[in-house]
């Protein structure tokens, strides 16, 4: 086989692997402009440290149980703003959290696909999202 066929097979494998990791919530897509950006997704919540950050991050949420979840956003920002949207598989918002509305309750299906979409506007500081 030619080297181009090997390259095409490798590229296809790599794309499939990245898609699988994204769907499982192990990698995130983002568009960020920041001096410092540290994003740590977890099973029971996410945490973020930022400095002069503007942009967004989206990743698949991991909700394995069908139950009602209470989401709490704890922004500890010295400047700027942060918002978190919980989206369903059709990218429709189910929950919107920010500084003025830091807590929300939503019933989720353990077999459904959900995405957490963080938006930063000139944000500096730390924030956490727990569920």
Image: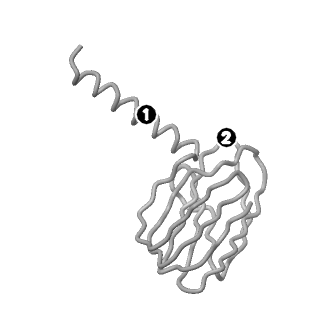
The residue identified by callout 2 is 111
Q: Residue furthest bottom?
A: 79
- Comparing marks 2 and 1, which lies closer to the viewer? 1
Q: What's the residue at 72%, 65% (across, down)?
A: 71
For the C terminus, give its image quadrant: bottom right
Element at label 2: loop
**Residue 79 image position (x, y, % from top left):** 55, 86
Measure the C-alpha gap from mark 2 to mark 1.
21 Å
Measured as percent of width and height from the top left, residue 92 is found at: 53, 58
Quadrant in the rendering for residue 74 = bottom right
Which color mode does the image show? one colour
Q: Which residue is mark 1?
A: 16
Which circle marks residue 34 in the picture? none
Number of labels in the image equals 2
Give the image location of residue 81, x and y in percent: 55, 80
**Residue occupying image coordinates x 28% and y 27%:** 7
Does label 2 or label 1 sit earlier along the sequence?
Answer: 1
Q: Residues within 10 Å of mark 2 (few under 14, many from 20)?
A: few
Looking at the image, which residue sits at the far front? 36
Under circle 1, the secondary element is helix
Q: Nearer the viewer, residue 72 or 123?
A: 123
In percent of width and height, residue 37 lies at: 51, 67
Q: Taking 46 as reference, is 90 left or right?
A: left
Please tell me which residue is depicted at 57% across the width and 73% down the height of the picture.
Answer: 83
Please, which residue is most extreme toward the top here?
A: 1
């Amino acid at each position: 086989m030619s080297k181009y066929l090997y390259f095409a097979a490798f590229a296809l494998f790599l794309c499939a692997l990245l898609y699988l990791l994204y769907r499982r919530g192990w990698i995130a897509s983002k568009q960020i402009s920041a001096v410092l950006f540290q994003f740590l997704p977890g099973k029971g919540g996410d945490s973020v440290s930022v400095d002069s950050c503007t942009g967004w991050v989206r990743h698949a949420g991991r909700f394995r149980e069908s139950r009602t979840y209470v989401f709490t956003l704890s922004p500890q920002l010295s400047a700027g703003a942060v918002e978190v949207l919980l989206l369903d598989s059709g990218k429709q918002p189910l929950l919107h959290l920010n500084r003025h509305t830091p807590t929300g309750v939503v019933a989720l299906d353990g077999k459904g696909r959900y995405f957490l979409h963080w938006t930063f506007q000139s944000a500096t500081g730390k924030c956490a999202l727990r569920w």
